[in-house]
Image: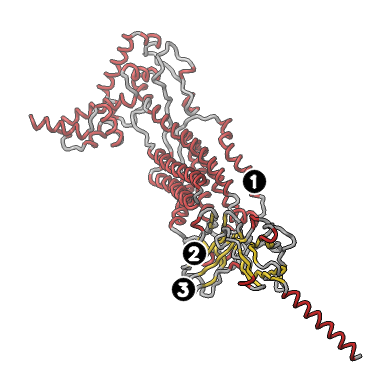
């Protein structure tokens, strides 16, 4: 029994000795560290001069040691000197240096290295390393906070242990990661998405973006402006938008109480302000984490409003100016809105968390860009036709009224909208230029978008001011029929002579010729036209109807017992003026006459202008300059000079 145990131990000792001699007779290359981010269960190969540099030679695969962290390969000791590299199966995935570039071949020399070599793989050629540096943190950062980097390189894990920033002796934080991605998106967290970094105002921060092709992105010196969960302050920008929104609510209440003859226009104005207020509130609220996490799809609402605002504002102007529109085709103006609504429908029915992920990962940036470009075209078109409507109205108005309508409110709104469109166009050009030049334009887009909404928010504030201070602006008087002075005189009046671009009430007004008026066919004779001119001129000089600041073509036609259509033709073709300039020419002559009288020597120029029928300083100055080629003050100085000479 004893001899059997001796024989067994002797055999075991011989096996151990033989095994050690076999290992000692081999070369060993051990990898003690591989780059973070190396795919799990990936095969690591040894390629060198001994196997004709084959990158995926199955005979030379590293084996993972039991510790799971190191790799080793054994080679015959006949290979005393050779060159080699480590690969992951192809030359596109060979080892590299820290910046991801190719490194020189490694050299094994038994006379210098011995039979066991330990190496570290700094990186892979298809990897790129990024070093994150944080020098300062928000004052609200807890003292014991642990910081992480979460991004598309670690499946957006907010607390991934391998991507924890290491605090340095100088108080800064540092982390180096490796990735094969061409574009890195990331954010800093304190371990959870509830404690992610935010903007200076505490709002959600868009993903930070790095481009592998940009050499400046090798080392990143970032600053964290705030933490979303530790910052709740409202910015001045938010306060302005909220103020405009609440101003809009007050304006809605005020407009409901206004009773006038243009209820349809006021109803559209209320709808317009409701839409604007809703957009402003959703714009502000979705910038806050709690609201966005609870109602993330509110972020789509401002985009939809862009396609509602323009046509509603267009209809408002038409009704405000009592211009007839084609109601059966009214719904066609909302086709762009319904198209975008259909486009957004899948997102409205999408799972909430999935939708949030798409927004955070900026997967919808292309959709928002396309919708924004389309919205620019739609709003630009409606801005153009709204301006045309106002300009046409002002031109036609001069043929029937002797005073200027107060349209400064509309002109100011059109100017503000034009300013928004200008910034909008600049933003689009910046984005296109950034794509071409491969420049990150995210900051430009954010600032421009904020500027557009800030300017846009001024509109309800402006409308609120006029609604409260000058409510008559919202109820322009009912208009009379407009006549086109360019048409030649006709021998008969037909249905075509009645204007059809105004309200139905005005269009249905009859055009009748009093009994004491000349037949229209006789107007073709020069003597009849001259006779009517003399009649009108005598009426103007003796009766002075122009003193009435609200004189209209219909008022004057009734006084002359003359058809308004004929009166307009005589003024336009006989006196070569429109009704506005015709009446103001008599006012200016009367103004000149009064300035010569001692009674008016102490009057201001504007007071005298009001005496002769002008209703505003602007209308007086503009008409005087147009008809005399001098300003009122220059004319007055000329009179004083003549009087001094005398």
Depicted 162 relative to depicted 127: above or below: below
Separation of disc 2 and disc 1 at Cα?
36 Å
Q: Residue at x 38, y 43 (%)?
A: 470
Q: Position of residue 346 (x, y in %)?
A: 66, 47
Q: Which residue is under mark 1?
A: 345
Can residue 352 be seen here? Answer: no
Q: Which residue is under mark 3?
A: 170
Q: Mark 1 or mark 2, which is nearer the start of the sequence?
A: 2
Q: Residue at x 62, y 56 (%)?
A: 357
Question: Residue 423: which quarter of the image?
Answer: top left
Q: Mark 1 or mark 3, which is nearer the start of the sequence?
A: 3
Q: How is the image coloured?
A: secondary structure
Q: Position of residue 549 (x, y in %)?
A: 31, 32
Q: Are marks 2 and 1 in contact (CB under 8 Å)?
A: no
Q: Which residue is under mark 2?
A: 224
Q: Mark 2 or mark 3, which is nearer the start of the sequence?
A: 3
């Amino acid at each position: 029994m004893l001899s059997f145990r001796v024989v067994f131990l002797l055999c075991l000792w011989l096996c151990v000795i033989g095994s050690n001699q076999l290992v000692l007779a081999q070369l060993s290359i051990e990898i003690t560290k591989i780059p973070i981010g190396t795919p799990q269960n990936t095969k690591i190969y040894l390629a060198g001069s001994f196997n004709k540099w084959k990158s995926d030679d199955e005979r030379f695969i590293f084996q993972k040691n039991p510790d799971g962290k190191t790799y080793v390969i054994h080679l015959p000791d006949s290979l005393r000197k050779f060159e080699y590299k480590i690969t992951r199966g192809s030359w596109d995935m060979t080892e590299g240096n820290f910046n991801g570039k190719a490194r020189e071949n490694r050299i094994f020399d038994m006379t210098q290295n011995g039979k066991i070599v330990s190496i570290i793989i700094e990186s892979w050629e298809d990897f790129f390393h990024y070093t994150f540096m944080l020098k300062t943190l928000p004052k609200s950062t807890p003292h014991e906070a642990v910081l992480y980097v979460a991004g598309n390189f670690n499946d957006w894990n907010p607390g991934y242990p391998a991507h924890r920033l290491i605090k340095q002796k100088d108080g800064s934080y540092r982390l180096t990661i490796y990735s094969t991605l061409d574009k890195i998106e990331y954010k800093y967290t304190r371990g959870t998405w509830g404690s992610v970094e935010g903007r200076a105002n505490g709002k959600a921060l868009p993903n930070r973006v790095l481009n592998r092709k940009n050499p400046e992105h090798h080392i990143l010196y970032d600053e964290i402006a705030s933490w979303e969960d530790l910052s709740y302050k409202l910015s001045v920008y938010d306060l302005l938008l909220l103020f405009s929104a609440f101003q809009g609510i007050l304006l809605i209440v005020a407009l409901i109480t206004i009773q006038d003859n243009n209820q349809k226009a006021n109803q559209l104005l209320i709808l317009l302000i409701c839409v604007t207020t809703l957009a402003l509130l959703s714009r502000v609220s979705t910038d806050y984490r709690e609201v966005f996490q609870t109602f993330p799809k509110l972020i789509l609402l401002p985009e939809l409003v862009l396609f509602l605002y323009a046509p509603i504002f267009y209809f408002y102007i038409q009704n405000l100016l009592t211009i007839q529109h084609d109601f059966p085709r009214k719904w066609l103006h909302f086709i762009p809105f319904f198209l975008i609504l259909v486009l957004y429908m899948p997102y409205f029915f999408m799972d909430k968390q999935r939708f949030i992920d798409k927004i955070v990962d900026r997967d919808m940036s292309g959709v928002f860009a396309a919708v924004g470009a389309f919205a620019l075209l739609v709003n630009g078109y409606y801005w153009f036709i709204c301006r045309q409507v106002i300009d046409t109205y002002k031109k036609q108005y001069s043929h029937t009224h002797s005073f200027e309508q107060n349209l400064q409110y509309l002109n100011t709104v059109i100017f503000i909208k034009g300013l928004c469109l200008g910034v909008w166009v600049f933003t689009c050009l910046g984005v296109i230029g950034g794509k071409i030049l491969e420049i990150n334009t995210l900051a430009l887009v954010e600032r421009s978008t904020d500027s557009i909404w800030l300017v846009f928010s001024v509109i309800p504030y402006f409308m609120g001011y006029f609604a409260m201070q000058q409510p008559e602006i919202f109820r322009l008087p009912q208009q009379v029929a407009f006549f086109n002075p360019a048409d030649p005189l006709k021998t008969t009046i037909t249905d075509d002579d009645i204007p059809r671009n105004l309200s139905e009430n005005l269009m249905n007004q009859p055009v009748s010729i009093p009994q004491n008026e000349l037949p229209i066919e006789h107007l073709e004779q020069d003597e009849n036209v001259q006779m009517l001119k003399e009649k009108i001129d005598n009426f103007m000089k003796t009766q002075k109807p122009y003193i009435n600041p609200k004189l209209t073509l219909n008022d004057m036609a009734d006084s002359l017992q003359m058809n308004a259509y004929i009166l307009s033709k005589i003024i336009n073709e006989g006196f070569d003026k429109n009704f506005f300039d015709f009446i103001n020419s008599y006012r200016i002559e009367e103004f000149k006459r009064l300035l010569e009288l001692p009674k008016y020597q102490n009057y201001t120029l504007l007071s005298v202008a009001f005496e002769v029928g002008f209703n505003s300083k602007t209308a007086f100055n503009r008409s005087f300059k147009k008809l005399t080629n001098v300003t009122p003050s220059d004319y007055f100085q000329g009179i004083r000079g003549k009087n001094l000479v005398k």
